[in-house]
Image (spheres, rainbow, N blue to C red):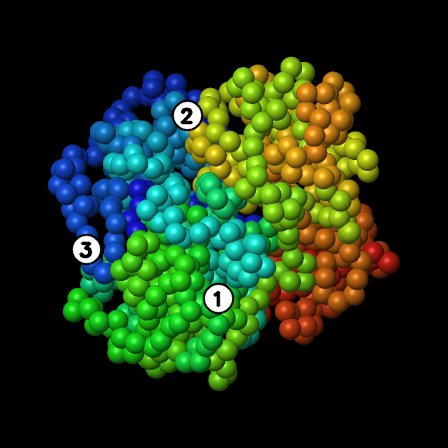
Amino acid sequence: MKSVIIFFCIISCLFITPVLAQISHGGKPLPYLLTRSAEGNLFESMPSFDLQEQLRLDSMEYNGLRNSNRFAYKFITGFTPDNAGITYTLADGTRVWRLGIRSAGAVSLNLLFTEYELPEGASLFIYDPEQKQVKGSFTSQNNSERRILPVSPIYGEELIIEYQEPANSTFHGKLRIGEVNHGYRSIQRVAEPASEPSGYTCILPLICSLPDGDPYQEVGRSVVELIVDGVYYCTGSLINNTNQDGKPYLLTASHCLNEDFALKNPDYEEIAGKIIAFFNYNSPSCESPMRGTEEMSMVSTYCRAINESTDMALLELTEMPPLYYRPYYAGWNATTSSSGTYACIQHPGGATKRFSLAEKVQLDSFKDSRYNFASNSFWHVPEWIQGCTAGGSSGSPLLDGDNRILGALTGGRSYCYFPYNDYFYSLYYSWEANEESAHQLKHWLAPNQTDRLCDGMDPYAASPAFRLSLVIENGKYDLIETSQSDETYLFGLNGSTKEYAEQYTTSAAAHVYGCYLVTPSFSGRNTLDVDICLYTGIDKPETLVATKKFNPILQYTDGSTSGETSKPLYRSQEHFIAFDTPVVAGRSFFVGYRINNEVNFCTYNIQKGEMTQNSAWIKQGEEWIEASQASGIGFNTALFIDPVVSYYTKTTGNELLASELDIQVNVMRKDKRIDLIFPENPSGAHYRLVDFAGKVIDSQMIQEAQSTWSYPHISSGIYLLSIQQGDQIITRKIVF
């Protein structure tokens, strides 16, 4: 039940250092005027193709795995600085290569660099001719073992590649554009998850489970939407292993990677490298689903195990998801024994996360003459008591009554009006169905052990992140409004009133990573100038400690990226805006927004009469006033602004500790190196590194203000670094 999608992009969100990612590193391209005035043939034009024939092929329903329509056409190319575009040298010796790509009638264009290796100091940009959409810069930090770089779409028929290389570079950059992808459908935007499916209203959004005691919210954080090869929607889930070492294994279905077994001898490693995973793409409302946050994504995986006879695929993300993504590694059940209510958490049609329920499953065969699946290797769901599955649900987990993964969806023919007969390949059969590690699960999930049961794990359990939401915690997510009158939002631009905030008080000092905002539709984003603001204060907002432009980026977020984005605002949706660095906010803080020009902007708020206490604040003139006391409002409410925080309390053990130590910690994950920089002589400071199981790796005094520790021979995984100076201690989680 894989779904074909509109775009060919692979994009990422990594937390500290990129491995293979579309993470931007600042800078700007040269003025386009230089391009227009340069001599030579800048543009390469893609050939035409038979769109009507492509649409005819798209309309065909292929098989029981239920592909839906393809929405883009892929051109195989080989453009390099040596065979295409123009080159010239600036006055300072910088060498510049520019190449334009044109494909008539394209809704969007995007690229895959099949060769990418840049020297230090070089920069790559991709942009439209008006430079309103700018991707980059991409630098040597984007170099990877695979030497590829996928770039998300530029909307329109034309784009321009610009490469800048300093005169003193140690080598000439290696660039080859191997794919140009022509988006030809406009039923949804390119480079994003899908809109809400009209045909699957029986599959409820995950937030709808909250009234039943929150049974699926934790394990639901393990489920991600996958975009494979820029073509297909599928679903996957982060899965734990018995070493509890935080390796980000990702379980999905093999047919998501081999075009429903149409590819003969597929290069699974290459395909795995072109996968993007979207985290937390959830509707913030139940009764009227809306688009979730699209800013949390990670690109590229390693292929660890494939078994086509069972449809099993086990991947591994190239990086551990960052703390503020709030990842969860689901447990698993590789036995034939299970009970309780069974659940499937999925992204039907590439839309927001949904869940379906069943009372019974049984081991059975998935019989279809087109496939040679092993007998009795599937969990058969004879009937759903709630929901069904759909295209895009392939690879989604089947959970037992303890929320352990039993298997992952291969196919079936269930619909809302026919909720019967879906098949999930079983972990039981895929466990050791093949002796080779590349074709089994046991080698990866339970190495050197006999365990067939494993509980789930929060990899950041020592200091987890939380989404604070007065709207959700009060169960008011379906009782929200914008209080709009005469096209003016009550919590928007109203005369001199341009700033609003939501109050939070916590039991421990909080570090704020960013915040979710749920907004109605807007127009005219080119003129939007809004700041997300974080204030500290006890009784009201007092001290402004951090700001970030409201510029929601669809493609990636790593906590430091700022730049142009094409994410539209013409629909009701949820956004996540990350601060450049986590902000120390203490126990009482306020998050909100400031409108800097004459634009119409607001977040949703809880309807009048639904709150007994007020948490929303308004700045009228120079004075902050509670919304319940403000002129023109005068009722208790809360704004749909939800910070993501972690708590830093002085404790023992492996929790992160509050500290006033001013120490810069830089982690080179690939090199397994830690750099420490003290503001002055680190007199009496002590350094200690332990692994996730508590084994001491290194322990010694720090002698220099700047020091480096390298560990090339230790295993990849999670480590805890602690630095003590006097009675001050700082502890930080390290991932190599």
Give x and y (percent) for residue 638. Answer: 66, 37
Give x and y (percent) for residue 555. Answer: 45, 41
Disc sitting over residue 239 in the figure? 1
Residue type (three-letter) at the residue carrying disc 3: Tyr
Residue type (three-letter) at the residue carrying disc 2: Gln
Q: Which residue is mark 3?
A: 62
Query: In the shown orientation, is residue 191 left or right of residue 293?
Result: left
Residue type (three-letter) at the residue carrying disc 1: Ile
- Kindly report the distance in space between the C-alpha atoms of the residues bearing marks 3 and 2: 41 Å
Give x and y (percent) for residue 583. Answer: 70, 42
Mark 1 crowd level (few <14, some 14–19, many ≥20, 10 Å Cα): many
Evaluate if marks 3 and 1 touch, with contact meaning CB atoms under 8 Å apart. Answer: no
Q: Quadrant of the N terminus?
A: bottom left
The residue shown at (36%, 36%) is: 189
In front of the other: 257 or 482 = 482
Counting the numbered discs, the total is 3
Query: In the shown orientation, is residue 689 left or right of residue 457?
Result: right
Residue, far top: 495
- Kindly report the distance in space between the C-alpha atoms of the residues bearing marks 2 and 1: 41 Å
Mark 3 crowd level (few <14, some 14–19, many ≥20, 10 Å Cα): few
